[in-house]
Image (cartoon, rainbow, N blue to C red):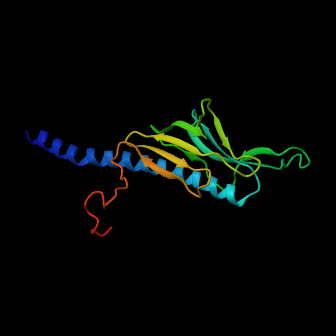
Amino acid sequence: MVVAALLALLAGMILPRMASVNRQRDETGIDSVADLLRMYAFRNSSMTQEIALWYDEESNVVSLWIKDIDAENPDGARIWHEDKLSMPVTLPTGMAITEALADGTVMTKSPWTIATRPDGSRPKIELRVQGETKESIIVLESWAVGPTRIELGEPSRSAIDLDNEGRGLERW
């Protein structure tokens, strides 16, 4: 009886911590993808080279690539290589990008690439990132300097008209 009580007590202390660890791991993974999109936007606005977001479902890695001069053939065509100024993001176990859209077009083949255009513009990027405890959609508008994150499964805030609600004199 005492042993069962001790095991129940230990389980009550350990299980919430394990759930918290999974939640934090998912949060970190989603934040890392959002940070990489922020770097994509920054590099696009501050560089002349084309830049691309690359994802390989098999290795679960997201990274940035740039189109630059080939060191072995400087007079030849520019080639894609991994960006040296940003770290690739390896998503945690149990997390994946389950859907990716570039200007509304679904990226179906893995590995996929979403590149900027030669004129310097870029597509709107939408990524659905799903972990064990969280699911988010990360949107980088074609004109934005950073991504917007939409948490799925959580209540969202929406704008209301205080006058229509009969609360026109309340401070906001």
Could you tell me which residue is drawn at 39 percent across and 50 percent down? 24
**The quarter of the displayed image where residue 132 is located:** top left
Is 79 above or below relative to 58?
Answer: below
Decide: is 5 above or below 166.
above
85 relative to 99 in the view: left or right:
right
In the displayed orientation, state which residue is furthest to the top: 109
Name the residue located 25 percent from the left edge and 60 percent from the top edge: 166
Q: Quadrant of the C terminus?
A: bottom left
Q: Is residue 58 above or below residue 172?
A: above
In depth, the one of 49 and 5 nearer the eye is 49
Residue 138 in picture, x, y percent from top left: 50, 47
Q: Can you tell which quarter of the image residue 123 is in?
A: top right
Q: Is residue 33 left or right of residue 2?
A: right
Instruction: Give the position of the N terminus as an image quadrant.
Output: top left
Residue displayed at 60% across by 30% down:
108
Q: Residue 102's spot in the image, x, y percent?
A: 61, 40
